[in-house]
Amino acid sequence: MAEIGLAGLDSNALVEFITAQRWYGSKTREIAHVRIVDEAPLRTGESPLCSIAVAEVRFHPGTHEMYQLLLGARPVAESWQSAVIGEIEGWTVYDALADATLAHLFVDLMHGDTTLEGGEGAIELHPVDGGVSDDWQALEPRVVTAEQSNSSVIFGDDLILKVYRRLEAGINPELELLRFLTDRGFPNIAPLAGWFSYAGRPLDATLGVLQRFVVGGTDGWDFAQDSLAGDAETFLATVGRLGVVTGALHTALASDPTDPSFTPEVPSVESLGLLVASVDEEIERVFLDLPEDDDELAPIIGRGEEVREQLRLLSLAGSVGRVIRHHGDYHLGQVLWTGDDWIVIDFEGEPARSLSERRQKRSPLRDVAGMLRSFAYAAQAAPMLRGADPPPNFEQRARDEFLAGYLDEVEPSLLPPGEGAIARLLSVFELEKAVYELRYELDNRPDWIGIPVSGIDRLLHAGVA
């Protein structure tokens, strides 16, 4: 697409397009300008043309973010109308994922190792052996509309292409973990089928992954809500298995002592101190900003120091087991129930954290705490979402079933020694998660703040010492 001078796209048109997208997360920041810093053509010659572009979004007062744009172009005479960005030199430029012809192109290029040269770097596309069948071109593409931070296209019932929109320097943890687990035949994931990445002057970054599509999967959150609106036992009967799958996942991620990126480690006193300090700072920031006139916040107003003191116990907890690569954003929305088993998805980690933070090794109990908090959310959200009151013991039963399955399956050396030590460390991570939830709900869903507040209140009453 170099023939039409993509770098000459009007900055205002790019700003208007980018800020309107669900995957753009900095909507409250004022943009100074947007410019294309590199592009690599995927298809030239006949219409439609296609390029992958790296765009720099620069803010006042001087910071910036990098984004990936997949750009198609057709002659203005073709009157293309979908996902249009602007016009340049007689061509209509648009989001290429809206064009079935171009969506197929990304998978086609992953049939073999491919390098596409740009002006400031190169894009490499890599297949996984056996990942893409020879008849995939007959599969109809459909864009997933529910996502927020990425873009995805499903091809029939066979493949799903996930495109990372905001780019950060370094390898995406999802690619790392999927490649590791696929290579070892871990059964409870959607296997990796290919990936593509960029290396150049602006940055080196993972651009996207291609996976096998999980047919008939229902995400765990919807499964739980549907069950709570009908028969809660339907969901509860599967939770023990979810614990087993989670334990097997952590054991698999800790199974290769020869790979430095995945070798389990004993956390140093210094690393625990840094972790406690970072969490402590976040707690102080959240509790300082709490509005004092909100009745729903009353149970925790003025208790920030109490929360901080409980979390400081992490540095005094003695053995905390091993730190490993883990999921990093584990909750019911990140698992699929197929009717027969659980599949774990979305290994990117918490989107609000930096890529380097998301790649850090942490205690596997941090994932466990995330799922336990998700059970609390499912129970307390059901009256708001479905008008259904959960059985009085729903959350406790889900916790008990999940933990029993998990502890039966996980490699014991990854955890602290003894049930009491496990329970204490788990409470620390639940409290950390609940504070993170509180900050999110205050910013995004004030009607839901009662859920993390009740969790923080419960954990403080129980204590973690």
Image (spheres, rainbow, N blue to C red):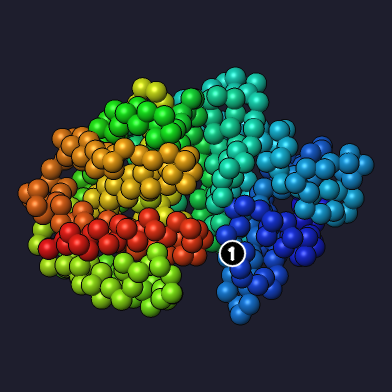
458 on left or right of 94: left
Identified at 11% across, 54% down, the residue is: 421
263 on left or right of 118: left
Residue at the right extreme of this rendering: 77
Coordinates of residue 17 in the picture (x, y in percent) = 72, 56
Coordinates of residue 67 in the picture (x, y in percent) = 60, 58
The residue closer to the viewer here, 71 or 439, is 439
The residue closer to the viewer here, 456 or 362, is 456
Coordinates of residue 76 in the picture (x, y in percent) = 89, 45
Relative height, residue 458 to residue 310 (above, below): above
Q: Amino acid at mark 1?
A: Ser
417 on left or right of 17: left
Identified at 20% across, 67% down, the residue is: 310
The residue closer to the viewer here, 137 or 225, is 225
Q: Quadrant of residue 379?
A: top left
Q: Quadrant of residue 139?
A: top right
Q: Quadrant of residue 458?
A: bottom left
Identified at 41% across, 26% down, the residue is: 338
Relative height, residue 10 to residue 83 (above, below): below
Coordinates of residue 127 in the picture (x, y in percent) = 50, 34
Relative height, residue 448 to residue 187 (above, below): below
Residue for badge 1: 26
Around disc 1, counting alpha carbons within 10 Å, would you say few (fewer than 14), some (14 to 19), or many (20 or more)? Answer: few
